[in-house]
Image (tube, rainbow, N blue to C red):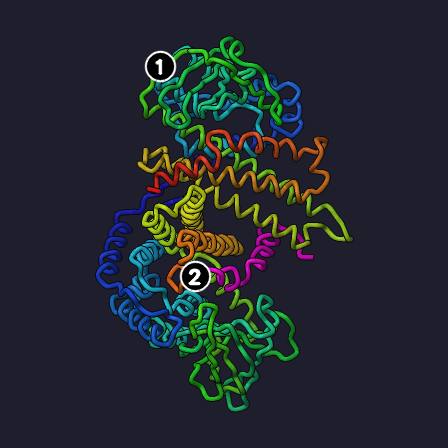
Amino acid sequence: MDLEYSESEKKFRAQAREWLVANVPHGLKSGDTAEGFAQHVEWEKRLYDARWAVVSWPERYGGRAASLWEWLIFEEEYYRAGAPPRVTQNGIFLLAPTVFDYGTPEQQDAVLPRMAAADDLWCQGWSEPGAGSDLAATSSRAKPDPTGGWRLTGQKTWTTRGAFCTHMFGLFRTDPESERHHGLTYFMIPLDAPDVTVRGFDRLDGDEGFAEVFLEDVHVPDEAVLGGVGEGWRVAMSTTGSERGLTLRSPGRFVSAAENLISLAQSRPDAATPILRDKIASAWIDAEAYRLFTLSQVTSIVAGGSPGAQSSLNKVFWSELDIRLQGTALDLLGQEAELDGAWTRSFMFALAGPIYAGTNEIQRNIIAERLLGLPRK
Amino acid sequence: MYFALNDDQTALRDGVRDLLNGECTPEVVRAAWTDPAAGASSLWAQLSEMGLPGAAVPEAQGGLGLGACDIVPLLEEAGRVAAPIPLVETAFVAAPLFAAAGLETELELLLEGKLLVACALDGSSLVPYGQFADRTLISSDAGAGRSIRMLDAAAAAAAGSAVDSIDATRAVLSLTGDRPEGIRLDLSPAQATAAWQRGALGSAAQLVGLARTLLTQTTAYVKDRRQFGVPVGSFQAIKHHLADALIAIEFAAPAVMRAAWSLDQGSSSRDRDVAMAKALASDAAERVAAIAVQCHGAIAYTTEYDLHLYAKRVWAGSRGWGSAEWQRRRVAVALGL
């Protein structure tokens, strides 16, 4: 056991903190609105210019080759500084790890620098009207074009910030005879291609960035395929592991939220009844427990282990702690919780946590089957 | 940053695990229900051969000089087999206290494996293991550690009466009426507080171990038990219960190890860290015990099946050394709430 960061890691933290404190913008509109999205992209470009956008990436792609520990530190500082949510997240944390693992050098050079610079903005095309938790029921299809490349047809939905993004990654069935997770292929698609239609619609909190994406015989080149043809399920699963685990929701986010909850309670001493104080302490303890769990998980990853199905433990825990935490804030606000404010919006967003990235019901199945070895049937 | 046991710690833990797997079977725990004193002293003799009595005693005073990070994994192992013995109280609380307070006679006996110690430092009048302990440590106020006093077996027996715990191995003594003076230990406030923290942390470690066993037993049971022609463990309702049990354990265990680290480092947050660890461990153990009973169905509701040996240890012990609510209040105060 050694729970101290090294001198160079402490220096990294100090550098990150100094830059963030001096540069973090406040009062941006929601990144899930058109106006707010543009403000967030501008912030992402500043992050990139200062080489803070993709700290864990190699330097040639705009990163700092930061270790996993340093990445955790950066995340802690990012949320501590009250910096805006990352609208580039689905590209940087979900697609990029897959591109690093499965992309050709040409694909890496084409995709990663523009993603880091927030020139290309990526959304995720997993869900379909008939394929939610049951991702293997994907019915969108791709067929080879006789003149080269592929023709994509289908509908993707619940696409976060799909109305504003420039590119989408997703699964398409390339073998029409195949079923379930066989015969799928992972594609990267520019949303400005002809015959792509994006229809934005409002999320629960009223922001309009949610979208469904219609593809009608859309042509993409062979370079749009990430990993092998027919290998889509395996390639995609490496992304969902990232999505559920620590890269999607690092502990820093919840530790900061718990600290904000404590500040809220301190500003409303009359509202902080003993029962609410217990819930606040619980929220802080859970956020801290998630941080400690992550430290042991990262220790194991650094030693060569893979989180695998463990990422389902992360996902259930952070998503449900978030709801408890935000709900406690609303209890502190009392009747004011009805008003359209930051805490109430955070509460509504927290309700999405147990749904996106694989519902918590699916995660609990994975935990029981892969970590405890219970029979699938 | 390295959040894991080192090779020495792993080897030590594995050694204790092997010993306990052999010497503290469910049959041994069950036998201790009939004769708790005999059960404890026979197991203590085995553990003494490994040097456990002196684990937390400085080498200069004849101990192994181990830290909390070395010892906590061993206590989790003791919890895993529901060792019917005041191990936390004797090895993790009393031994370093005797060393600090200069109680040479007691320390010598303890190091030889000839002394078992009971504790009631949380202000309660109930003393687990008090019916057969050779010494009993009492305090009037939980966690503050202003004053710790020691009773010998005769004084404790005179001041108390045996009461029935739901877990007979705990041989609870109830201190009725006026507390005997006993011997006041010559301790600094920091030493007394550290004793309380070690007790709460050791208890948390044992609860994590108990929870792990309850989950292991339940997992094995639901794979085996068939209804509607299939193992009941194939039903989502059961899977989700057990997933919740695993989550509760996996997010409590790191907090327990972090608290051990904080004690070893003398970190300024150690009181809060121990409180958090105990709160999570108590809640996890209670939750897992309830899930274990439910997922076993009717067979859980009998003493003929072994599950109750572990579940009752949780129910009897989870509120000692500060309940989850009590500990969360301590965390809240530390956070400025």
Q: Is residue A362 magenta?
A: yes
What subunit carries mark 2?
Answer: A
* Neighbours of disc 2 within 10 Å: few (<14), some (14-19), many (20+): few
Quadrant of the rendered image containing residue A30: bottom left
Instruction: Identify whether A314 is placed above or below B68.
Output: below
Q: Which quarter shows the N terminus of chain A?
A: top left
Report whether B329 appears left or right of B44: left
Residue A216, percent from left and from top: 53, 86
Give the residue drawn at x 51%, y 64%.
Answer: A356
Give the residue drawn at x 48%, y 73%.
Answer: A159
Residue position marked by numbered label 2 in the rendering: A338
Q: Nearer the viewer, residue B55 or A340?
A: A340
Q: For the magenta stretch, what is the residue range?
A: A348-377
Disc 1 marks a residue whose amino acid type is: Gly
Residue A340, percent from left and from top: 40, 65
Report whether A365 appears left or right of B90: right
* Neighbours of disc 1 within 10 Å: few (<14), some (14-19), many (20+): some
How many labels, in total? 2
Q: Nearer the viewer, residue B149 or A312?
A: B149
Disc 2 on helix, strand or loop? helix
Q: Which quarter shows the C terminus of chain A?
A: bottom right
Residue position marked by numbered label 1 in the rendering: B102
Disc 1 on helix, strand or loop? loop
Q: Is residue B13 magenta?
A: no
Report whether B29 appears left or right of A126: right
What subunit carries mark 1?
Answer: B
Give the residue drawn at x 42%, y 72%.
Answer: A207
